[in-house]
Image (cartoon, rainbow, N blue to C red):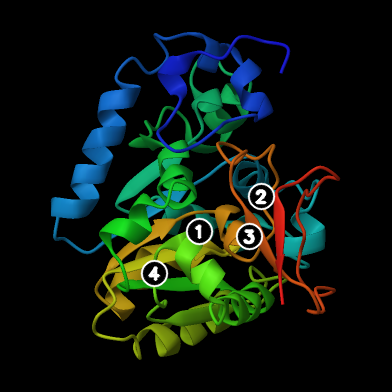
Amino acid sequence: MGFNINPQYNLPGTIDKNQNRKDKTYQDSSTWPTYQQDYKDFLEYLLNDKSHKVIVRVYDGELLFLLGKKKWNIPKRHVSVDLTQKFLQPFKDNVLKCDKFCAHLTIMPSGSMHNLYNQTFGNKKIDYPTEFLYAIVINKWIFKNFKNQIGLIGGYHKIKVIKELMKRKEYRDYLGIDYFTDYVEVPEKYGCDNPEKLEESLKEQLSKSDPNTKIYLFGIGICKMVVANKFKDFYPATYIDIGGTMSGLAGFLSVTRPYAANWMNYRLRNYNYSKVDPIDMGDNENITYLD
């Protein structure tokens, strides 16, 4: 990788080749000195805290969006309407109402994303590093400890792919589960455009949840900011924002994504993936094809 990896920020069952590890925050052990213990505490929190809760993550896309900047994939994937202050305010208000607030260490004072984060959320402290949310999926801890008690909230086409993959034993064995209890869908594109319609749809779907569902993993892009805090009112559970790792469940997680270098992307050989957002997949990825 061309730079030193500080082992303090490694997590069990994962390999990290993400460029964030070059950032001063990840090179410096004092950025988050209790990283390893806090990861263990996070796992204990999920296992033993019986309250219904929403754990959300924010990063560059969310920060730019809240600042009214249509950059990168924001206008292509997330929103097609004008980002007026009136439109944006409910997104910021509601994301701050989530129970736990996470981001990458680069938002810390010495990090490359600190100024952008500070412009958006001021000095708000994060509860956990976002990597914790990715790791429990990538190392499959969440599937082992909540086997057959997990539902998914994701984009329509990704959910469709995951349903098909779950029909294959090799994929189920890789995750270590027999089934997901529920599948909740949001629009694949422009989920932010109509917050009222989005909330109504999610409320209707979540209200029909399997009573065995204890955990919902969600990866629905920027639109989560306006509605995620209400999830536990629609159905009582723990909701964990796994971001782009949801794409990994659908077979599209790059080795350069945080902590994802050893994730295996399962693909269906004869499936039409034209409507599935491939995010940032490169040419040299971990892919296994299934019939």
- Please tell me whether mark 2 or mark 4 is closer to you in this view: 4
Camera-nearest residue between 284 and 153: 284
| Relative horizontal placement of residue 217, taking residue 195 as reference (left or right) | left
Mark-to-mark CA distance, 2 and 4: 36 Å
**Residue 261 on image: x %, y %:** 62, 38
Task: Say the numbered circle drawn on residue 225.
Answer: 1
Question: Which residue lies under the disc numbered 2?
Answer: 65
Quadrant housing the N terminus: top right
Question: Which residue lies under the disc numbered 3?
Answer: 247
Quadrant for residue 78, please give it: bottom right
Q: Residue at x 68, y 26 (%)?
A: 19
Quadrant for residue 259, please give it: top right
Camera-nearest residue between 195 and 156: 156
- Amino acid under disc 4: Ile
CB of mark 4 within 8 Å of CB of mark 3?
no
Question: Which residue lies under the disc numbered 4?
Answer: 177
- Please tell me whether mark 3 or mark 1 is closer to you in this view: 3
- Amino acid under disc 3: Ser
Q: Residue at x 65, y 30 (%)?
A: 18
